[in-house]
Amino acid sequence: MTQVSPPAAASGMEGHPQRWPALFTLLTAAFMNLIDVTIVNVALPTLQENLHAGPSEIEWVVAVYVLGFALALLPFGRLGDMAGRKRMFMLGVLLFTLFSALCGLAPNIETLIVARTFQGLAGGMMTPQVLAIAQVIFPPRERAQAFSLFGLAAGLASVVGPLLGGTLIGADFMGLDWRPIFLVNIPVGLAVLVIGQKIIPDLPGHPDVGTDFKGVLIGALGVFLLIFPMVEGHNFGWPAWLFALMAAAFAFFALFFRHTRRQQAARRPQLIPYSLLANGNFMLGAGIATLFFSGVAGFFMVFAIFLQTGFGLTPLQSGLTTIPFPIGVLTASLLSGRLKGRYPRQRLVGGAVLMAAGMGLLDIVISSMGDTATRSLMAAPLFIGGLGLGMGIASLFQTILAGVPHKDAGAGSGTLQSFQQMGNALGIAVCGQIFFATLGVQKASGADMHPAFIASMKGALIYEIAAFLAVAVLVNFLKAPPTGHDEPSRAQPPTPVEA
């Protein structure tokens, strides 16, 4: 195995000799993880039909993946520091591949949901190691170029995912229907394992770092108690005990805060540094990030169902319809790169407003539809929304982390990534709740299929518009950094967004 000597790894002046092939291998694993979100969206109506799944079960197929991913990021990032990043990365890829196979072979919706949960956990195991390894094997002068490729991988995943998913389902390869969207990960994962074992350097772990397993348990229970009622509410008819669970979630969050404070006082490891939890400005920023990303993931889940189940589009047609959005993301990302980190607040506010405008225009287009989905008219609103997301992503992290002390910058970036994923899960729960509840009311009132789906989609879009406008307002309450102006943070770049 290739070894990196401590002096070389520490200085980082020359970098590892096989750093570019190693980066390509790491990016392939990251791409596989990112594409597994977008590829599933176009398959949801087919899954619902073939596995006889209800609305809440379909929501769980998406939600448990991002929820498991969010909960795994911080603890497995720390375990990578302890046990060795290559070892944790390889284990994560192996488990991701195995659970992808289980997803593809699932005989029923219950098995698929369980497999997706562990697939998300495995994704959260390998993803933190990707940036951590790249940070070590590249010299400082090449890191910006290397990290920029992660954004490219994210953009490509958002474009390729819907097209690949639609193509695989439409081809009905060997009569497997939707299953190839998961089984395609098997050869990719095996290739990463074989090549990665040869060219990714072994990086020694630090067993004395420690991790906060009790904090992981408390935090996970709190998040689950909040998300579960939101997904299952319309299925159970919103009984009182679901509201009690949501109230208990906030009690667990308070317990997590107290536990972290005790860990800090005793100088023991903390899942999230107490200095960040006690930083009101950072926590406001984390709330803004959660709200921002909740407006993205939920939209694409219900939009695929709207197009396919509501208007009879094929999975491939559905995927092609959404392509203007990731094109907008890529366009804005390229334009934002020329600003070199300037005007982050203004770009974040502008991005949120553009997202709201795109959703508002889409609402107008959908309102004018009859029995046919006017796909060409949806292109401009989706492109505008993509421009907003691409403009807001980098500046969101930059603006929030600008006020974080440099000693907490790395932990702050990792924590924001977790809030990003929890925002995705929250958005899936809220948008799914609005969409399916409205659809149920419309059908109960005797409305025809197309008006019922239009009304349901409009309800979800109202949440999207409100979320992004709230972000545009709340950003103004973030305090300026000590220098009195917005500066780029020195934190590691965030994990690419799963658009």
Image: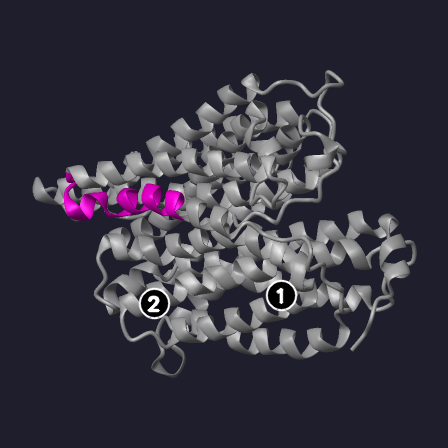
Residue at the spot 81% in from the left edge and 74% down from the top edge? 2
Q: Quadrant of the N terminus?
A: bottom right
Magenta region, residue range: 221-239
Q: Nearer the viewer, mark 2 or mark 1?
A: 1
* Residue type at the position of mark 2: Leu
Percent x, y for residue 365? 35, 36
Residue sitting nearer the eye, 191 or 275: 275
Determine contact: label 2, label 1, CB under 8 Å: no
| Disc nearer the start of the sequence (2/1) | 1
- Figure check: 23 above or below 390: below
- Figure check: 309 above or below 356: below
Residue at the spot 82% in from the left edge and 71% down from the top edge? 3
Q: In the picture, residue 117 is in which quadrant?
A: bottom left
Label 1: state its secondary structure: helix
* Residue type at the position of mark 1: Met
**Label 2, label 1: how many angstroms apart (C-alpha)?**
25 Å
- Which residue matches tag 1? 88
- Figure check: 98 above or below 148: below
Q: Is 399 left, or right, of 358 in this rendering? A: right
- Is-magenta flag for residue 232? yes
Percent x, y for residue 103? 39, 71
Residue at the spot 27% in from the left edge and 43% down from the top edge? 229
Residue at the spot 62% in from the left edge and 65% down from the top edge? 88
- Is-magenta flag for residue 258? no
- Which residue matches tag 2? 112
The answer to whether residue 458 of the structure is visible from this angle is: no
